[in-house]
Image (cartoon, rainbow, N blue to C red):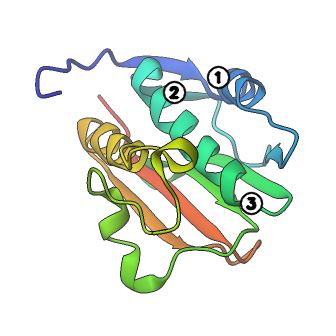
Amino acid sequence: HPDISMHWQAVPASDWLGQIISKNQVESAAVELASENVPDKVGMDPRLMELALSNLLVNATRYAKAVVHCSLSQENDGYVLTVEDDGDGIPETERDSVFKAFTRIDDSRNRETGGYGLGLAVVARVAELHGGEALAESSGALGGAQFSIRWPVHG
């Protein structure tokens, strides 16, 4: 939506992450929080970033074989929120297009099982509103997909 306004806050990172992860736990894949290097507070719109992180966690738990890792760190003058899984990953040729609305790379999925292809478009928009970007890569640690939202320190 073009009229979304940002409500920047300094959010206690560990508590915020813990709450969102607990809301998105499923039996099919354990969501693990990487607790090292989590900053005390992170500047963000917590409502919008929760929407983005929830979309990433839903996707990761859907495609993971057993494990999903979530981390939040501060690097130089910005923050990095990462969700990675041990699933089959995303082909390199598809990684840029997954953030476009209505894109679903698995043709065998239908709307009953796969959604409408809007989740990652929402993630990209939230990253953009924060002055950052969303990235799709391969998870070096788990072998599946890795999605990151990077945004600068605000203020």
Q: Position of residue 123 (x, y in %)?
A: 39, 44
The answer to whether 31 is drawn above or below residue 86 in the figure is: above
Question: Which of labels 1 and 2 is toward the front?
Answer: 2
**Figure quadrant of residue 41:** top right
The answer to whether 100 is drawn above or below residue 58 in the figure is: below
The answer to whether 6 is drawn above or below residue 121 in the figure is: above
Decide if residue 122 is in sight here. Answer: yes
113 left or right of 106? right
Quadrant showing the N terminus? top left
Dot 1 and dot 3 residues touching (CB under 8 Å):
no
Label 1 – label 3 distance at C-alpha: 23 Å
SS class, disc 3 = loop
> Which three-letter amino acid code belongs to the residue tagged 1?
Trp
Name the one closer to the observer, 107 or 45: 107
Label 3 – label 2 distance at C-alpha: 20 Å
Mark 1 lies on residue? 16
Dot 1 and dot 2 residues touching (CB under 8 Å):
yes
Q: Residue furthest left?
A: 2
Mark 3 lies on residue? 64
Residue for point 53% across, 74% down: 90
Q: Position of residue 54 (x, y in %)?
A: 57, 34
Mark 2 lies on residue? 50
Residue for point 40% across, 61% down: 104
> Which three-letter amino acid code belongs to the residue tagged 3?
Ala
Which of marks 3 and 1 precedes in the sequence? 1
> Which three-letter amino acid code belongs to the residue tagged 2?
Glu
SS class, disc 2 = helix
